[in-house]
Image (tube, rainbow, N blue to C red):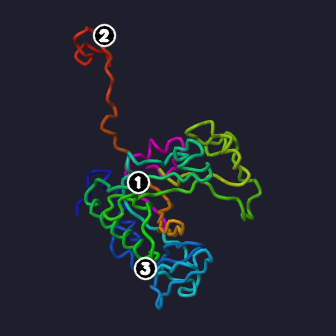
């Protein structure tokens, strides 16, 4: 087979070959055969089980959930032995241009209805089909696999909350990816302050870009208890993208994504919630310009009372 002459397609197909070989590429329907939900804390995490467990039984140990039946198709640690690591799933997608909140602070405006405080912020974005054949057909499989996986961890009597697929749960055309921006220093035995970045570093608390600079004090208050986790996104040269360039590099971009999947139930509203949590983003093609990008505003040299500016001689 001849190699594609389109450099973007060539790069995407090489990524597709590499991800398919991993066995956890969701564009392949067989990827779900070695995946199993495992209890973690008050929720569940999707894990990779090389040999599917037998005699799988659901368990629940949380006192707060004694009144609810546990989800079926969930393995306990006793079923599978040693606690497995979360499965890192992969896909090739395009980051949606409109539903994009993957800025350095998720567009945080201050305490309110969206985020109660800056510590609660989790930058996110919606993911859509790549817009590139033959990978577009893979994206339909990705959505089908995600629906299948979430249906395997449903709390009896609970409905599906707005989370992974947004409001379109029955016939999703996209799904959401989020990033945990802050990591607690609690229990970090290696943390002795030696890894604190100088105030001039672009990844430091002092230099971290904010939508509203007035929130700087709130951010700095976390410095002794948390560390900032930059979005693990890499450009075409495999360099970590700086926080002030997330929108420029990622909004509307073709990317390969690596993520984990988790579930928890909200007892107060009897809803199941699922979350795709970012592990890695690798850029495959720069963002496509929006329909109005690059359009120049032309300034007329002269106006008359009965004409519009667009019909007059103008300078760009």
Mark before the other along the chain sequence, 2 or 1: 1
The residue labelled by disc 2 is 301
Residue 18 versus residue 306: which sits nearer the camera? 306
Instruction: Tell whether position 99 is magenta.
Output: no
Query: Which residue position is annotated with label 1?
Result: 126
* Separation (CA) of disc 3 from disc 2: 68 Å
Secondary structure of the residue carrying numbered label 3 = helix
Q: Is residue 119 left or right of residue 94?
A: right
Give the residues in magenta: 235-261
Determine whether label 3 and label 2 are within 8 Å by CB: no
Q: Are marks 3 and 1 in contact (CB under 8 Å)?
A: no
- Rendered image quadrant of residue 52: bottom left
Secondary structure of the residue carrying tag 1 is strand
Residue with the mark numbered 3:
34
Mark 3 crowdedness (10 Å alpha carbons): few <14, some 14-19, many ≥20:
some
Res. 289 image quadrant: top left
| Front residue of 273 and 94 | 273
> Mark 3 vs mark 2: which is more N-terminal?
3
Compare residues 183 and 6 and report the one nearer the observer: 183
**Mark in the foreground, 3 or 1:** 1
């Amino acid at each position: 087979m001849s190699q594609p002459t389109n450099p973007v397609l060539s790069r995407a197909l090489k990524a597709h070959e590499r991800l398919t070989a991993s066995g956890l590429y969701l564009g392949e329907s067989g990827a779900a055969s070695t995946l199993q939900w495992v209890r973690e804390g008050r929720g569940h995490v999707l894990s990779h089980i090389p040999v599917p467990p037998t005699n799988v039984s659901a368990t629940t140990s949380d006192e707060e959930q004694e009144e609810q039946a546990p989800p079926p198709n969930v393995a306990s640690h006793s079923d599978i032995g040693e606690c497995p690591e979360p499965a890192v799933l992969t896909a090739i997608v395009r980051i949606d241009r409109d539903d994009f909140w993957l800025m350095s602070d998720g567009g945080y405006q201050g305490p309110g209805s969206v985020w109660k405080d800056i510590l609660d912020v989790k930058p996110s974005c919606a993911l859509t089909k790549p817009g590139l054949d033959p990978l577009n057909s893979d994206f339909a499989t990705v959505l089908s696999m995600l629906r299948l996986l979430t249906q395997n961890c449903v709390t009896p009597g609970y409905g599906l909350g707005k989370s992974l697929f947004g409001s379109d749960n029955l016939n999703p055309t996209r799904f959401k990816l989020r990033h945990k921006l802050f990591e607690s220093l609690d229990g970090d035995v290696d943390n002795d302050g030696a890894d604190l970045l100088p105030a001039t570093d672009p990844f430091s608390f002092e230099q971290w870009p904010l939508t509203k600079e007035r929130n700087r004090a709130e951010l700095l208050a976390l410095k002794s208890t948390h560390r900032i986790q930059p979005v693990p996104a890499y450009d075409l040269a495999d360099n970590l993208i700086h926080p002030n360039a997330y929108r420029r590099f990622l909004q509307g971009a073709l990317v390969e994504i690596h993520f984990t999947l988790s579930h928890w139930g909200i007892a107060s509203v009897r809803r199941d919630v699922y979350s795709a949590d970012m592990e890695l983003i690798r850029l495959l093609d720069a963002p496509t310009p929006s329909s109005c990008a690059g359009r120049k505003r032309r300034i007329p040299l002269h106006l008359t009372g009965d004409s519009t500016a667009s019909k007059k001689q103008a300078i760009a």
